[in-house]
Image (cartoon, rainbow, N blue to C red):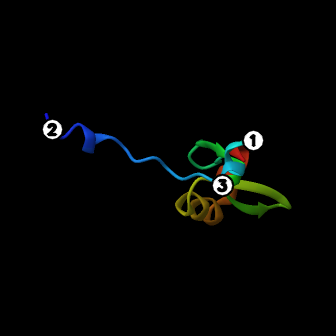
Amino acid sequence: MGGAASDRQQPIDVPSDAVSRKLVRDPVCGMHLTEGLAIVERSGGEPVFFCSEECRNKFMDEPMKFAANA
């Protein structure tokens, strides 16, 4: 019973400007995240937003596979 305090997650330090920005959608996994926290790449002259390097790399390897989701 003494471990309850250690089970709590620590707060995440998020930049305040990231919280106030609009939500964007990762075309690979479908996750929504704030624009300020996203990884941005240009594809066809348009910005594409990703939640992680893994999703960015998957998109860059096969952009046509995910184009409809962008």
Residue 46, position as x, y percentages in the image? 83, 56
* Residue furthest left as drawn: 1
Q: Amino acid at mark 3?
A: Ala
Residue 48 x %, y % = 73, 55
Q: Residue 50: image x %, image y %? A: 63, 54
Q: Earlier in the sequence, mark 1 or mark 3?
A: 1
Query: For the image shown, how many numbered marks are present on the structure?
Result: 3
Q: Which residue is mark 1?
A: 22
Q: Amino acid at mark 1?
A: Lys
Between circles 1 and 2, the one closer to the viewer is 2
**Circles 1 and 3 in contact, beta carbons < 8 Å:** no
Distance from the alpha carbon under mark 3 to that under mark 2: 38 Å
Q: Are marks 1 and 2 in contact (CB under 8 Å)?
A: no
Q: Secondary structure at mark 3?
A: loop
Residue at 72% across / 50% down in the picture?
17
In the image, what residue occupies the spot 52% across and 61% down? Answer: 54
Q: Which residue is mark 2?
A: 2
Label 1 Cα neighbours within 10 Å, binned few <14 / some 14-19 / many ≥20: few
- SS at badge 1: loop
What amino acid type is highlighted by mark number 2?
Gly
Classify the position of the N terminus by image quarter: top left
What residue lies at 18% left-to-right and 40% top-to-bottom? 3
11 lies left or right of 19: left
Tell me where residue 64 sits by quadrant. bottom right
Q: Which residue is mark 3?
A: 38
